[in-house]
């Protein structure tokens, strides 16, 4: 097991590289999720301000056969 971790003398370079890469990937994931949440909130706010959410609900109701 020790030989595997040392990787022929290059383990001191390989394992930190993996660690840094994993850390960057986690940071990117968190940043992406936060950005998505912010964008969705902005989109919902703009729809509400423009009154588009009410129009879409009415269209959905009409297309579901609620119209006589």
Image (spheres, rainbow, N blue to C red):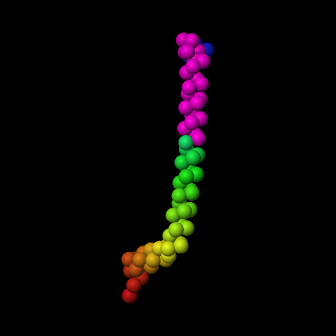
Look at 56% across and 26% down and name the residue there: 17
Note whether 26 is above or below 18 in the view shown.
Answer: below
Residue 56 in which image quadrant: bottom left
x then y, percent, for residue 28: 55, 42
x then y, percent, for residue 15: 58, 23
Task: Please state, as top left, top right, bottom left or bottom right, where the N terminus lies in the image.
Answer: top right
The answer to whether residue 57 shows anywhere in this view is no
Look at 53% across and 60% down and name the residue there: 40
* Residue 59 magenta-highlighted: no
Task: Please state, as top left, top right, bottom left or bottom right, where the C terminus lies in the image.
Answer: bottom left
Look at 57% across and 19% down and name the residue there: 13
* Residue 18 magenta-highlighted: yes
x then y, percent, for residue 64: 40, 77
In the image, 31: left or right of 58?
Answer: right
Note whether 3 is above or below 37 in the view shown.
Answer: above
Note whether 30 is above or below 53 in the view shown.
Answer: above
Look at 55% across and 44% down and name the residue there: 29
Q: Nearer the viewer, residue 68 or 31?
A: 31
The answer to whether residue 15 shows anywhere in this view is yes
Q: Which residues are magenta?
A: 6-27
Residue 18 in which image quadrant: top right
Q: Nearer the viewer, residue 6 or 45?
A: 45
Note whether 4 is above or below 48 in the view shown.
Answer: above
Specify the principal SS of the magenta part. helix
x then y, percent, for residue 10: 55, 15
């Amino acid at each position: 097991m020790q030989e595997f971790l040392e990787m022929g003398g290059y383990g001191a370079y390989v394992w930190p590289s993996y660690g840094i890469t994993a850390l960057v990937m986690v940071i990117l994931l968190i940043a992406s999720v936060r950005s998505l949440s912010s964008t969705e909130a902005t989109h919902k706010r703009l729809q509400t301000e423009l009154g588009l959410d009410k129009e879409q609900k009415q269209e959905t109701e009409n297309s579901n056969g609620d119209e006589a």
